[in-house]
Amino acid sequence: MSMITKPIQINFKELRNVRQQNNNKIVYYSIKTNDIKTFNENINNKEFIRTLHDLDFTKEEFFKKCIDDDKFCIAISRLISKNASRQGSKDETEQLRTCNITSKQYGINITNLTATELRPTKNGEIISKKEMIDNSILKDSCLKSFDGKMNGKMNGFIAAKVSYGSGGHQDNVFEEMDTLAEWWKTYKCNTNEILIILIDTDLLHKMIRLKEKYRYVNNIMIFNHIELQQYIIDTYYDDDSI
């Protein structure tokens, strides 16, 4: 098998659009088939309650209206379905999976971590979920958990995010990543491990500003998913990776 010499490119913005369309369809068909379990699992419940209030509908009246009026059902499904931009963990999983397809051919294995598997604490430690429970460490004593771990020719951790558009939780992404990078600079700058900040975004001015801030910290690297793969290819291509 020959090595990948070009990064694999994913259009995360389009990926979200497709996922949103699928979310809408799932809600629509769950209404039409009276699949209440699927309906409840795929709606924004707060938005649903607000919709009932605004329309002055009971749940029974709402479902009857949807069955009787197909266009109403299509429109309302879009309103109350889960927002794809709030399902960031699916994007982050895809970021890491894609980068690992390339990286593993160059002697670097990237593994996904669960949302609570490994967290940095504010006093400079990295703890597991078990250690957090055993030592009664509160969540507010920790920073954002790591999303991935690297082993092999690169060792360390990855914090991953996909952020398109501004406003709401999107605005917190760069602040969260900046806090984590500052923590790494304070506690881990003299280690051989690397922190990868992996962000796919259209907020390029914020991305550039974050890169510049940590440009001279040797073991902090800030990339999007294409740049990370390209760095690995450029750095390790001449090695006997396979």
Image (cartoon, rainbow, N blue to C red):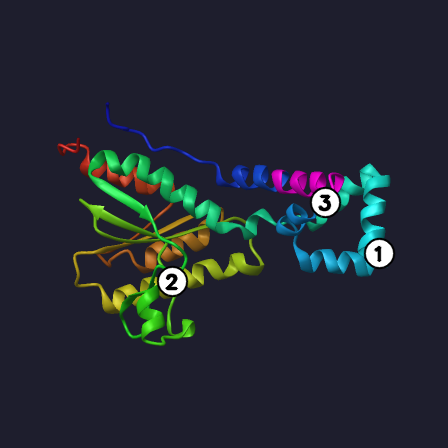
Compared to residue 26, the image places residue 52 above or below, namely below
Count neighbours of disc 1 (C-alpha within 10 A) and say few if under 14, some if 14 to 19, many if 20 or more. Answer: few
| Rendered residue at 70%/48% (across/down) | 36
| Residue 206 x/y as whole percent | 44, 55
Residue 65 can be seen, yes or no: yes
Point out the residue furthest to the left here.
240
Q: If you read the primary sequence from the N terminus, does the residue marked by circle 1 or circle 3 appear first?
A: 1
| Residue 163 x/y as whole percent | 49, 50
Element assignment for label 1: helix
Q: Nearer the viewer, mark 1 or mark 2?
A: 1
| Residue 126 x/y as whole percent | 28, 65
Looking at the image, do the residues carrying marks 1 and 3 touch, with CB atoms under 8 Å apart? no
Tell me the residue that label 1 is attached to.
55
Please tell me whether the stretch drawn in magenta is mainly helix, strand or loop.
helix
Q: Amino acid at mark 2?
A: Asp
Horizontal relation, residue 48 to residue 117: left or right? right
| Rendered residue at 78%/42% (across/down) | 73
